[in-house]
Image (cartoon, rainbow, N blue to C red):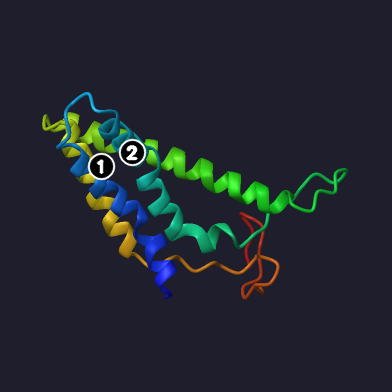
Amino acid sequence: MTPQDLVVRMLPPFGGWLALAALALPGGSPLRGAAVVLFLAAGPGAAAVRICAPALGARPAEGPVERRDADFARHSDLLERLMLVLFLSIGAVMFVATVLIATHTFSAQRVLLTLTLLTTCAAFCPPLRASPTPSTTPSTTPSTPKGSAP
């Protein structure tokens, strides 16, 4: 692992710890709000997408047949990852907040602390290995139709 990989890997947890430190600022501070919102919108999802990145990149995007755009796959994959980061982060925030509400322990600081700890744990997880494409894996067992005897 190169130092650049380590820095990229640790950016989401660093953003979470920075957002927790920003809670010491006054309540109406724009810096406090920006740090918290930026982490909640991208931090947990970025850590999760980093874990799944090799599996996501295993199959390239397929563009429309009638249009020959050379950069379609690159732009499509980037947009896919950005949307996954955003929606996984929002989902994680909603899930953690719901669990804390259900246990009657909800507070904004607890949500932020829980997500920061989960993001830190995700940063230490190794990335998933990509599975081979289905066309390259030979079938070892013959397939039989449902309900028929082999």
Mark 1 and mark 2: Cα distance apart in space: 9 Å
Q: Position of residue 135 (x, y in %)?
A: 70, 67
Residue at mark 1? 19
Q: Residue at x 38, y 63 (%)?
A: 7
Mark 1 residue type? Ala
Q: Nearer the viewer, mark 1 or mark 2?
A: 1
Q: Position of residue 14 (x, y in %)?
A: 29, 53
Q: Position of residue 120 (x, y in %)?
A: 27, 56
Left or right: 32 in relation to 52:
left
Q: Which mark is residue 104?
A: none
The local crowd at label 2, few if under 14, some if 14 to 19, many if 20 or more residues have their Cα within 10 Å, is many
Q: Nearer the viewer, residue 47 or 133?
A: 47
Q: Secondary structure at mark 1?
A: helix
Left or right: 130 in relation to 13:
right
Q: Nearer the viewer, residue 145 or 70?
A: 70
Q: Which mark is residue 40?
A: 2
- Mark 1 vs 2: CB contact within 8 A: yes
Give the position of the C terminus as an image quadrant: bottom right
